[in-house]
Image: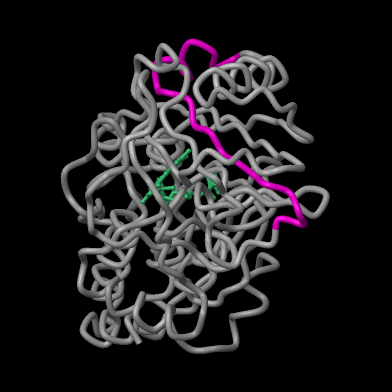
Amino acid sequence: MGPLERGTAMRNGPLVAVIGGGIAGQSAAAVLAAAGALVTVFDKARGAGGRLSTRRDAGLQWDHGAQYFTVRDPALKARVAQLSANGTIASWNGVIGTLGPNGFVPEDRTEPRFVGHPRMSALVGALGSGATVYGVELREIAPRGPRLTVTDRQGEHFGPYDAVVVATPAPQAVPLLALEPALAAAVAEVETAPCWALMLAFDKPLDLGFDGAFVAPETTGGTLAWIARDSAKPGRDPAGAETWVAHAGPDWSRTHLEDPPEVVAALMTAAFVAATDRSMPPIAAFAHRWRHAMTTRPLGRPFILDPRRPIGACGDWCLGARIEGAFVSGRALGAAMAARLGLSPDQASSSASQ
Ligand SMILES: Cc1cc2nc3c(=O)[nH]c(=O)nc-3n(C[C@H](O)[C@H](O)[C@H](O)COP(=O)(O)OP(=O)(O)OC[C@H]3O[C@@H](n4cnc5c(N)ncnc54)[C@H](O)[C@@H]3O)c2cc1C
């Protein structure tokens, strides 16, 4: 009996392991838990949240992954309304546009943008099941009789479980799905692109006159694709400093993928200075590499579920490269897996949007 099983074996309900504590895994876990499953979430990172994450350092913070999200799905709309009312989500009404070689042009778009409040990572817990996230990197799913175990890098086994949900980025899902080669092969068709993120802090305002800008390729030769005044998002407490996030373009990120972060930070800071025409030295500048930042070729369906064994996979790579896509995918697999386990999917999907 594994350590996690000991905590749940005396309770009723099927046991489900969710591998990956990002928005997709948490959304699947929420649906399954609402339907009566006992869910254990594993994530290899220290904190859950995946690409929806916030870096904190010396009293400063940056949303260095996902910047904001938009909402079309009715279930997400309902959750956003609830979470806006309790202060976990806020509208971001900043001045946003395009930064071209001739300067900034504001957009005329009206679709609302939302952010986690007071940081993006607040959203993950709010949409999740509340289950403890175990900081374990898993590498294998194996059968044990009719059930499944999962194994970490050190060879420790967890389970057995009645079902396993894989909610990692697609390239990391492929080896985990090796038990079912057809699933692994389908997920291997998904393609992703990397993104280097730069976090900057200044002790005085830059006075750029905008809060976020898509950087036109001509402006920095493709080095930067997006810059945002992170400290201008609602509820941020930047400790008196002005913080900015810059994202490099996908081609530039690929070319510099294996460069040391200090080198990347220096190159991106130089591009930021050139694009904004501000030469004030930052009080902090560091870079983070997102190896599988964006899906460039999605699966094209909301999730994948093995017809024989209760193993499924979900993530933003199923339908598209965004938070909303991860939410929709996770919920859809959660409901399908609940049905597979004999739990009521109706109860699952309606409870998950409560
Ligand atoms: C730079 C950047 C900017 C973005 N901007 C936006 C934006 O503005 N708007 C928007 O909507 N979306 C944006 N996105 C995309 C958005 O962040 C993702 O679509 C969404 O967060 C994906 O959620 P997910 O749960 O599918 O995957 P993830 O968030 O990647 O979660 C997967 C989790 O699996 C874990 N994991 C991986 N392998 C293992 C393993 N073997 N064992 C255990 N755990 C494992 C990882 O640690 C991770 O926490 C951006 C992403 C990046 C990187």
Q: Is residue 329 above or below residue 335?
A: above
Q: Residue at x 28, y 54 (%)?
A: 325
Q: Is residue 252 magenta?
A: yes
In magenta, the rendered stretch is: 238-258
- Residue closer to the observer: 214 or 10: 214
Q: Is residue 332 above or below residue 36?
A: above
- Residue closer to the observer: 124 or 37: 124
Q: Position of residue 246 (x, y in %)?
A: 53, 33
Q: Residue at x 35, y 18 (%)?
A: 217
For residue 246, side relative to residue 165 (left or right)? right
Q: Residue at x 44, y 72 (%)?
A: 127
- Residue closer to the observer: 352 or 154: 352
Q: Quadrant of residue 182?
A: top left
Q: Residue furthest left?
A: 300
Q: Position of residue 186 (x, y in %)?
A: 24, 36
Q: Residue at x 53, y 65 (%)?
A: 234
Q: Is residue 330 above or below residue 90?
A: above
Q: Quadrant of residue 107?
A: top left
Where's the N terminus, which quadrant? bottom right
- Residue closer to the observer: 95 or 198: 95
Where's the C terminus, which quadrant? bottom left
Q: Is residue 204 above or below residue 261?
A: below
Q: Position of residue 349 (x, y in %)?
A: 26, 79
For residue 240, side relative to residue 296 (left or right)? right
Q: Position of residue 317 (x, y in %)?
A: 31, 43
Q: Is residue 18 magenta?
A: no
